Amino acid sequence: MYWSSKEKDIYEYELYKKKKDGQYILYKVFQYEKEKMSFLDDNINPGNVYLYSIRAVFKDGATSTFKEITVTY
């Protein structure tokens, strides 16, 4: 997956993951490196639906709203 932001002062991104009927868990934290970021999830099983939700964490501790995507493998 790819994402980008033009926001200033981003410290990191938090990626949450769940199966279709499960609960979100904090899956990975990415240190901000550049405007366009990417991630390949190799912890998946064919035939499942996964939901990912990501948000930015700013240097002052504030967070952005979540952006959610659904992926069927």
Image (tube, grey):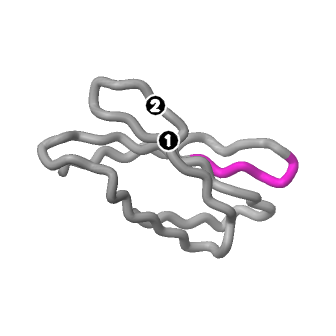
Q: Earlier in the sequence, mark 2 or mark 1?
A: 1
Q: Dividing the picture into quarters, in which one does residue 70 lie? A: top left
Q: Position of residue 47 (x, y in %)?
A: 12, 44
Q: Residue at 87% x, 48% y: name it.
A: 60
Q: Secondary structure at mark 1?
A: strand
Q: Are marks 2 and 1 in contact (CB under 8 Å)?
A: yes
C-alpha distance separating marks 2 and 1: 6 Å
Q: Position of residue 1 (x, y in %)?
A: 39, 63
What residue did someone put label 2 on? 24
Which stretch appears magenta? 55-60
**Disc on res. 16:** 1
Q: Quick one: label 1, few (<14), some, or many (20+) residues within 10 Å? A: some
Q: Position of residue 57 (x, y in %)?
A: 72, 49
Query: Looking at numbered disc 2 in the image, what kind of residue is underneath it?
Result: Tyr
Q: Is residue 9 left or right of residue 17?
A: right
Query: Looking at numbered disc 1 in the image, what kind of residue is underneath it?
Result: Tyr
Q: Is residue 30 left or right of residue 22?
A: right
Which residue reaches farthest right? Answer: 60
Q: As displayed, is residue 29 above or below residue 50?
A: below
